[in-house]
Every structure is written in C-alpha cells, then in structure tokens.
Amino acid sequence: MLTVDFTRFPVSAGDLVLDLGCGAGRHAFEAYRRGANVVAADLDGGELTPVRGMFAAMRAEGEVAPPAAAAPVTADATKLPFPDDSFD
C-alpha cells in the first residue's frame, strides 16, 4: 500500500488539500491535524460516513486547531465539483 510521507510532502496550516479517493481517510486526517483545510473526496459515499465522524472527533478532542476545516464529499474524479486551481 502506498502512503504519503508528510516529511517529503509538506502540508501546512491554511493549505487547501484535496484527498481524492480518500477511502478511510488516513491522509486527510493527517493533513487536517497539520492545520490544512481538507476536502476528503471519494466516489463511494459509504466510505465517507466514518470519515465525517473522525473529523468531528478530532475537532472535539482538540487534535485540530481552528481555523482548519474538513469536509467529506462524494465526488467522481472525472467530474469534480470544484473549479480548476481550487487546491494547493
């Protein structure tokens, strides 16, 4: 399984990150922890229910400082609902 090495792919507070094909959300969670504004997108909406819950739990436990934000979105990679150049 491939995973992101966040020491080689730095994500900073305020970055706008798209985790496309987020699945269970492991990369989205780490980007969110680092203060990024995260959109976790997956075609399978069923994958996003626990992702939504984890985002809320992370916020409730103080793992993420405002103004970082995170949102799960059901999206098809071939027809993304975002304008070009929306993400860092």
Image (spheres, rainbow, N blue to C red):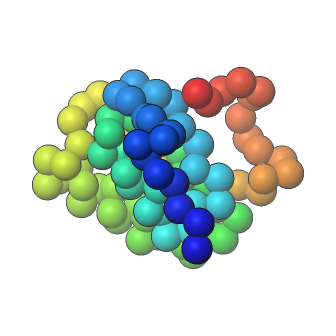
| Residue 2 placement: quadrant | bottom right
Locate residue 16, reporting x and y percent: 51, 31
Query: Looking at the image, how many numbered discs can be counted on the residues?
Result: 0
Residue 73 visible in the picture: no
In this rendering, position of residue 35 left or right of residue 16: left
- Residue at 77% across, 56% down: 76
Q: Quadrant of the N terminus?
A: bottom right
| Foreground pick, 67 / 22 | 22
In this rendering, position of residue 22 left or right of residue 65: right
The relative height of residue 60 versus residue 11 in the rendered view (above or below) is: below
Residue 51 visible in the picture: yes
In this rendering, position of residue 75 left or right of residue 11: right
Instruction: Name the outermost residue toward the front.
Output: 8
Q: Quadrant of the C terminus?
A: top right
Instruction: Name the outermost residue toward the right.
Output: 78
- Residue at 24% across, 55% down: 58
- Residue at 37% across, 51% down: 30
Locate residue 37, reporting x and y percent: 43, 35
